[in-house]
Amino acid sequence: MMNVKDIRIIIGIIGNVLSTLISLSHMPEYIQIYKKKSVEGVKPDRHILMLIQCSLWVLYGLPVVHKDSILVTTSNSIGFVNEVIYVVVFWICCEDESRKINVNLCLLAVFYFVTSFYVITIWAIESLFAKYTLIGIVCNIFNICIYVSFAKKKMLESKTFKYMPFWLSLVSFINAGLWTAYSLIYKIDIYVLICSGLETLFCAFQLIVHACSYKPHQVGVIV
């Protein structure tokens, strides 16, 4: 008979699957970029920032920081690999050398920041609670900054509150809901709860926007 911990693990595994699908949502675009050998107007900013975000959450879920959260690490490890693929494809297909140099500098900065943060939290901080608290706070601050900056940018570009396509909003809402449940079952994980709870609200808002702006096809009436 399943206990509460087993249910939490099952929810986390489903969350891993959905998180992977969401992470792969950019893959068709980058397949086209690779085929055309041109990045056109695509910018790598989001993917570079996502590398940092995934790296931080990978660290958060490690047993040396937080026990019983390894599924957070696996989910973000897969996301990290996908983001690396996107950045590599962008770099290979980018014709502008100055943009390549900028990407190189950004990746170098990311490497130094993430490496320094890992070293400080794992070896310089002895208290497990202090590690868990510091990484959890940094992860959530970074997540909020990414959501706000990219949502604002997308809304300004499109002149609408729609930030994500409907299907992506729906899957993201379900995924965020699962991780919220994951953070509440067996033991409360406050930092995953804050992150997934905010994402659930954000995705719910997106679904409401889609519902309010939905216009059914009008059927012509033959007289």
Image (cartoon, rainbow, N blue to C red):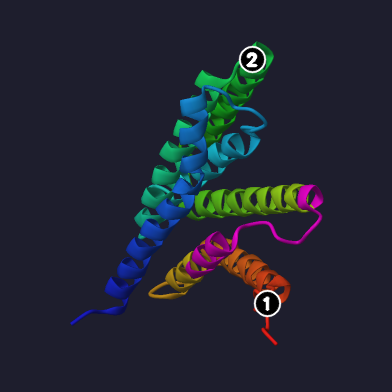
- Amino acid of disc 1: Gln
Identify the residue shown where x is 31% and y is 78%.
4
Say which element carries label 1: loop
Depth order, front residue of 164/77: 164
Direction top: furthest residue: 97
Label 1 – label 2 distance at C-alpha: 51 Å
| Local crowd size for mark 1, using a 10 Å CA cut-off: few (<14), some (14–19), many (≥20) | few
Residue beneath disc 2? 101
Q: Looking at the image, which is closer to me, 165 or 144?
A: 165
Residue 47, disc: none
Magenta part, dominant SS: helix
Q: Residue at x 76, y 47 (%)?
A: 153
Label 2 secondary element: helix
**Image x and y of residue 42, in percent:** 64, 33
- Look at label 2 and name its amino acid: Ile
**Can residue 170 be seen at all in this image of the molecule?**
yes
Q: Which quadrant is home to the C terminus?
A: bottom right
Residue projecting furthest to the front: 223
Extent of the magenta region: 156-174
Q: Is residue 93 left or right of residue 106?
A: left
* Label whose residue precedes the other's in the sequence (1 or 2): 2
Please tell me whether residue 158 is drawn above or below residue 2 in the rendered image.
above
> Is disc 1 in contact with disc 2, using a CB cutoff of under 8 Å?
no
Residue highlighted by disc 1: 218
Q: Residues within 10 Å of mark 2 (few under 14, many from 20)?
A: few
Query: In the rendering, at what x and y percent does residue 179 appear?
Result: 47, 66
